[in-house]
Image (tube, grey):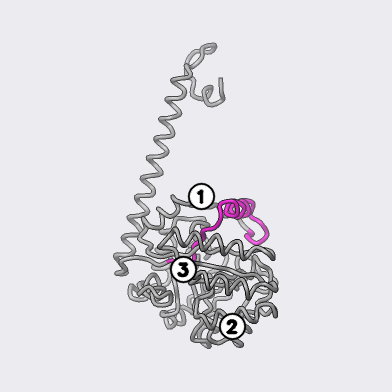
């Protein structure tokens, strides 16, 4: 008798529970779990819909979501499960499902456009990732075609190729990539991206764990040399919020995304300074919704409600952040 059957067996010692009955009980338990999961999903869709109603947004645009090859995503999830050095704390993945279910979840929340953020952690990866992303965008019309690059001699050619394929957003991860954005191999890349006018979502803040080239200094030097670069500072620059707000104030093409900011999870480690809220409000046209879906340790609705409750900046600001700004920047108006 299996452990499951032993645990379920309430008959007298020495008797065996019929296999058919055990299978039926397992099926009933599975069905109950499925119903509970469906109820939770429906409740969360209602929360997101109520949020959209409160801010007057017919839909959401999420500039910071992750879709990537399944084997690579499994490795990313395993890294989070192990609380690897770049994570630094327990980080359960809330939306650990297959690709189609993840797409269904976003669409069920009323997300009209999203990205497929991927990033290389070593040389020689970027081109194959970009090819995968081009195929994903071709079969996923509501995905904003996303590409990436690494600091290596072929980077300019990789970026040209991705732009020719139709890339509309780029992802740069200085923490995971561990490269200096001022690397001479990237000088032409930044110029190409500035000329193309495509947003480059860049993890350049030092959260959750500082990297060798994170913080406002290295990427700030790039913006000084390429003032037309449409840099999107991921996570509002967490934890160097005020420094990145100042960078955006100095450079009209610099934007910020809200990924994880103001959530209870982020506030524990890197609370947003409340005296900086007026500066965030002033930059309202250059703040974009980001979430890190599916790699978040809380429900998607929590990110939206935290943004609403902890900023107190009102429906018009939230509507611009959650839809209108990205629609304009990404040419979706």
- Which residue: 64% across, 65% down? 176
- Which residue: 38% across, 62% down? 111
Residue located beneath label 3 in the image: 63
Horizontal and vertical percent position of residue 259: 50, 67
Q: For the residues labelled 3 and 1, say whether their Cβ atoms are less than 8 Å apart.
A: no
Front residue of 134/233: it is 134
Residue located beneath label 2 in the image: 191
Is 303 located above or below residue 279 in the figure? above
Is 149 located above or below residue 74 in the figure? below
Q: Is residue 309 visible?
A: no
Q: CA distance from mark 3 to mark 2?
A: 22 Å
Front residue of 159/61: it is 159
> Crowding near pointer 1: few (<14 within 10 Å), some, many (20+)?
some
The disc, 3 or 2, on the residue closer to the chain's N-terminal end is 3
Q: Which residues are magenta?
A: 62-88
Q: Is residue 241 visible?
A: yes
Nearer to us of marks 2 and 1 is 2
Residue located beneath label 1 in the image: 96
Label tally: 3
- The quarter of the image holding the C terminus is bottom left
């Amino acid at each position: 008798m299996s452990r499951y059957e032993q645990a379920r067996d309430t008959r007298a010692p020495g008797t065996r529970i019929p296999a058919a009955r055990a299978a039926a009980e397992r099926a009933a338990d599975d069905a109950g779990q499925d119903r509970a999961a469906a109820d939770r999903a429906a409740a969360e869709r209602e929360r997101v819909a109520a949020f959209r109603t409160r801010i007057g947004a017919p839909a959401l645009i999420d500039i910071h979501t992750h879709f990537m090859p399944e084997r690579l995503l499994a490795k990313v999830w395993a890294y989070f499960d192990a609380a690897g050095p770049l994570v630094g704390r327990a980080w359960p993945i809330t939306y650990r499902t297959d690709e189609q279910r993840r797409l269904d979840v976003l669409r069920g929340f009323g997300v009209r456009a999203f990205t497929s953020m991927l990033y290389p952690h070593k040389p020689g990866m970027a081109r194959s990732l970009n090819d995968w992303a081009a195929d994903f965008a071709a079969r996923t019309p509501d995905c904003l075609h996303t590409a990436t690059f690494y600091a290596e001699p072929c980077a300019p050619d990789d970026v040209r190729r991705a732009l020719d394929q139709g890339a509309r957003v780029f992802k740069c991860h200085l923490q995971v990539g561990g490269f200096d954005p001022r690397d001479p191999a990237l000088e032409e890349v930044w110029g190409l991206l500035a000329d193309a006018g495509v947003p480059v979502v860049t993890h350049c803040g030092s959260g959750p764990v500082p990297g060798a080239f994170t913080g406002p200094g290295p990427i700030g030097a790039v913006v000084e040399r390429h003032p037309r670069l449409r840099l999107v500072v991921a996570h509002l620059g967490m934890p160097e919020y005020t420094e990145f707000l100042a960078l955006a104030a100095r450079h009209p093409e610099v934007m910020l995304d809200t990924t994880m900011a103001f959530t209870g999870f982020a506030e524990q480690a890197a609370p947003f300074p409340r005296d900086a809220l007026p500066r965030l409000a002033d930059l309202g046209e250059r703040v974009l919704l980001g979430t890190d879906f599916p790699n978040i340790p809380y429900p998607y609705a929590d990110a939206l409600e935290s943004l609403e409750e902890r900023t107190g900046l009102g429906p018009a600001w939230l509507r611009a952040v959650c839809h209108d700004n990205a629609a304009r920047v990404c040419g979706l108006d």
